[in-house]
Image (cartoon, rainbow, N blue to C red):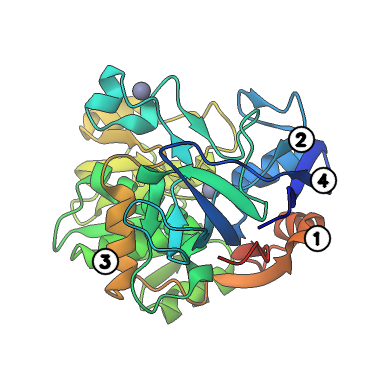
């Protein structure tokens, strides 16, 4: 541990990612140093990489990307012997405001998140993390799959928001990584789940996980019937994980009267037109879901540990840290990928 620098993948501007030396982080009193073994790439990383911005958040100075990390603890920390495999919760709230105190810390106005500029992320060898945001992995779980706990926590939060109940008929639109995780969590809650996607390969993957799937085109409502009432045999709940407006609307049109729609995927277009009058006539509920809050990460770890959600098979490519640029380009351009991982070597515990 004599080294004073470590390697980090730093975004300087759109498509300008450089792997550089940075000072080794010095953990504070309530922080744990983690040697990063795997970081999943997701849509927000790709937005920053391609455009230098993601929604209202703009890259104004060079920032380390990455917010889906797992690794091994370095040195003994409170309740965590050196070398403990852990998943890292990347969004850190203030802990004091009314929303934090109510457990809704995903909404904290003072919160920061790894890899959301200007906060540096986890595409590095070493990262310092507040102790409460370090989650030990279940025995026997591959530390690399720990990188999937973050998207799994997104899924847990969304299914909680939807209040999915046993026996419900649930539709998940979009069978990317978040979609198949949301579908598996809903199935673990006892729902009968169908996923839809335009891509046959993604539907086939969902089927291999034991989920029913339909072509998204089959859900597109007939314009001639746009004013017809919702079918009583429609879905109880739809969770849109595609971020595509027409998919959300198709899902809403597939609900039964009184059903619930949940926006989970980041909307590609910030303003989406909804059939509001029709929704009111059916007394539908529209909810949104953002990241994860109290208890969601812990639940995600338990679901993965109990084998109730399968994470294997979601990882479709791995790149070492020095090739982080290639990893981002692959995730951006290769539509056959589900989850691309970057695997820093890290300093050994
Ligand atoms: Zn993500
Ligand atoms: Zn707060």
As measured in the structure, the alpha-carbon distance from the residue carrying label 4 to the one carrying label 3 is 39 Å
Residue labelled with disc 2:
51
Local packing at callout 2 (Cα closer than 10 Å; few below 14, some 14-19, many 20+) is: few
- Residue at far front of view: 2
Residue assigned mark 4: 17
At which x and y percent is residue 62? Answer: 77, 32
Q: Secondary structure at mark 4?
A: strand
Label 2 to label 1: alpha-carbon separation: 22 Å
- Residue labelled with disc 1: 322
| Mark closest to the chain's N terminus, 4 or 3 | 4
Which residue appears farthest toward the left when viewing the image?
166
Q: Secondary structure at mark 2?
A: helix
The residue that mark 3 highlights is 187
Question: Toward the viewer: 178 or 348?
Answer: 348
Q: Nearer the viewer, mark 3 or mark 1?
A: 1
Whole-number angstrom distance, CA of label 4 to CA of label 1:
11 Å
């Amino acid at each position: 541990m004599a080294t004073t620098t470590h390697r980090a993948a730093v975004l300087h501007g759109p498509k300008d990612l450089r792997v550089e030396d940075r000072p080794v982080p010095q953990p504070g009193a309530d922080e744990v140093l983690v040697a990063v073994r795997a970081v999943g790439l997701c849509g927000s990383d790709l937005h920053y990489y391609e455009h230098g911005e993601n929604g209202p958040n703009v890259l104004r100075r060079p920032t380390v990307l990455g917010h889906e990390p797992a690794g091994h603890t370095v040195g003994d920390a409170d309740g965590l012997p050196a070398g403990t495999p852990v998943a890292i919760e990347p969004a850190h709230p203030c802990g004091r405001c009314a929303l934090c105190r109510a457990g809704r810390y995903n909404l904290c106005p003072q919160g920061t998140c790894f890899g959301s500029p200007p906060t540096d992320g986890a595409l590095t060898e070493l990262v310092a993390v507040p102790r409460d945001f370090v989650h030990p992995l279940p025995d026997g779980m591959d530390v690399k799959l720990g990188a999937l706990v973050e998207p799994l926590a997104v899924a847990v939060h969304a299914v909680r928001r939807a209040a999915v109940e046993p026996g419900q008929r649930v539709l998940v639109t979009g069978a990317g990584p978040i979609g198949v995780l949301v579908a598996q969590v809903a199935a673990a809650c006892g729902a009968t789940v169908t996923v839809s996607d335009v891509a046959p390969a993604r539907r086939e993957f969902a089927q291999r996980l034991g989920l029913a799937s339909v072509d998204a085109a089959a859900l597109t409502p007939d314009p001639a019937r746009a004013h017809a009432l919702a079918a009583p045999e429609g879905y109880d709940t739809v969770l849109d994980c595609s971020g595509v407006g027409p998919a959300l609307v198709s899902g809403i049109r597939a609900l039964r009267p009184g059903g619930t729609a949940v926006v989970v995927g980041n909307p590609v277009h910030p303003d989406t037109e909804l059939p509001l009058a029709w929704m009111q006539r059916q007394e539908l509920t529209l909810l949104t879901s953002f990241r994860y809050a109290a208890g969601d990460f812990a639940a995600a770890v338990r679901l993965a540990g109990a084998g109730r959600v399968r994470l294997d098979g979601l990882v479709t490519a791995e790149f070492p840290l020095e090739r982080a640029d290639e990893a981002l380009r692959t995730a951006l351009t290769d539509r056959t990928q589900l989850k691309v991982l970057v695997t820093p070597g890290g300093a050994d515990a």
